[in-house]
Amino acid sequence: MQHLNLNKQPLTKKALYNLLSSRFDGADKKLSHIPNPALLHNGEKAAKRIAQAILTNQKIVLVGDYDVDGVSSTAIMVDFFRQIPYPLEAIIPNRFNDGYGVSPKILERIDADLVLTVDNGITAVEAADICKQRGIDLIITDHHTPSDNLPDAYAIVDPKLKECNYPFKEICGAQVAWLVLALVKKELGLGIDMKQFLDILAIAIIADVMPLIDINRTLVKEGLKYMMYSQRPASIIIRDFLNKSQINSEDIGFMIAPRLNSAGRLEDASIALEFYTAKDTNKAYHQFELLGKLNELRKETEAQTTQTAFTQVNENDKVIVVAGEGWHEGVVGIVASRLVDKYSKPAIVLSMHGEDAKGSARSVGEVNIYELIKKNEHLLTKFGGHKMAAGLGLKCENIELFRDAINKSAESIPKEDFIPKESLSGVLETDEIDNEILTLLDTFEPFGEANARPSFLLEDAEVVSIKLLGADKSHSKIEVRQYPHQRKTIELIAFRTVYKMPSDRRISCSYTIAKNEFNGRVSTQLLLKKIY
């Protein structure tokens, strides 16, 4: 049982409105409030060099990354260059053959005057030296945390650099790429409308779990609106697939991002890039079908690995470290998230191949997993990431040493830092759950990181009935009565959970409220989050 901020405060709509309003200081920003991209350190230097390469017909090669943010950044660049028009060679490294980012291995197959990176490069010290030797100018655009040793590149654009004065630091790789392109547009006096990329930007911001506050909130809001009428073939297919009158951040987070991600996780991210950059809906549809199949395969692989990982957990550890021979590298990050959910502790999941292991880390609460890993970097061959998620590599023989060391490092972290940030808004009276509350919640969209969809508490409610739903009966519909004296019952949906009638016919749980659209009818849907 996790210690929760179990707020038992009875809530009315008015109280909920005030509670959610208190998360934001003042009115939402407009697109015109996005800080000037020229405030990015080296932004103008990078843009001038890119413009010069275009004007003098130099060969430009782009190196992206295989997650959603990396593919989105690459897609925005490819689309922008297509509209100039200017030939851009775009390479997204393959997770299995190339490893991450602009690496010596990738540079072997690149012949260029200028190499650009998106969503990677801040740790590419060796690659930068190779570029220098070969007379290639390297421009790095990234948003990850720099270490003390920076690559010796022509220009590094990263809002997290100490000397960067960009006022809002928590932006994703696609946003950095987009801002740099805005400077290139200005430099070349092009008539390209930068708003046309908002649909892709919104997907990247949501998928990379950026805080949905400040300009991120504005970009996601406007991007989701734009997605409803964008003529980009990929957006047309997403609209058709979701089939809703408005798309929200959770639709992207749960339905679209995992599909885009599955390409790079299981096969090659070019499948997702070709979806984004498809020139007609036939091509986009074909790629989206492929992504759907890969996503199903990803779910099966991940479920099997998760089951095996559970058997290895030492429950006394503060930081869970598990490793398996031949575990699929593409799913270790998701498996780490599953372990975090189950044990409320940071988790590191490693895949072993021969003498080497590499894997992913996910954190919980206020624990900074990047700092914990950094303290033990002497045992690693490589690492990188941020507070809540990181990637790392090490020799298999050092796994146990690393496990002991990182658990020793975690001893000094206060207990309360490990408490998951599941804070409940309160107890919503049954009569307050109606279509009006959907309108209220809509006002505070988009929900996500740093603006969580409010969760409510049901305490010791009576379970009236349970029905299993879906073709494979894998979802539960639980009918509950909140208080004994009430006639009115409410229904909770638990996706991918088979819930059996408890012996005392009681339930305590948290839930969120979502909008259910079916055949043009809108109703409230209560989604079960956690059972206590």
Image: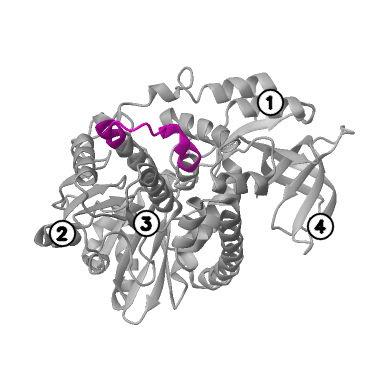
Name the secondary structure under disc 3.
Answer: loop
308 left or right, relative to 43: right
Residue visible at 48% across and 31% down in the picture: 217
Q: Amino acid at mark 4?
A: Leu
Q: Is residue 357 above or below residue 159?
A: below
In the picture of the structure, the residue carrying the numbered disc 2 is 131
The residues colored magenta run 183-201
106 left or right, relative to 332: left
Residue 65 is marked as: 3
Q: Main secondary structure of the magenta part?
A: helix
In the picture of the structure, the residue carrying the numbered disc 4 is 468
- In the image, 472 versus 50, the foreground residue is 50
Name of the residue lying farthest toward the right:
487
Q: Amino acid at mark 1?
A: Thr
Hey, which quadrant is residue 21 in on the image?
top right
* Upstream in sequence: badge 3 or badge 2: 3
In the picture of the structure, the residue carrying the numbered disc 1 is 439
Residue visible at 63% across and 44% down in the picture: 239
Task: Determine the CA span between mark 4 and mark 2.
Answer: 59 Å
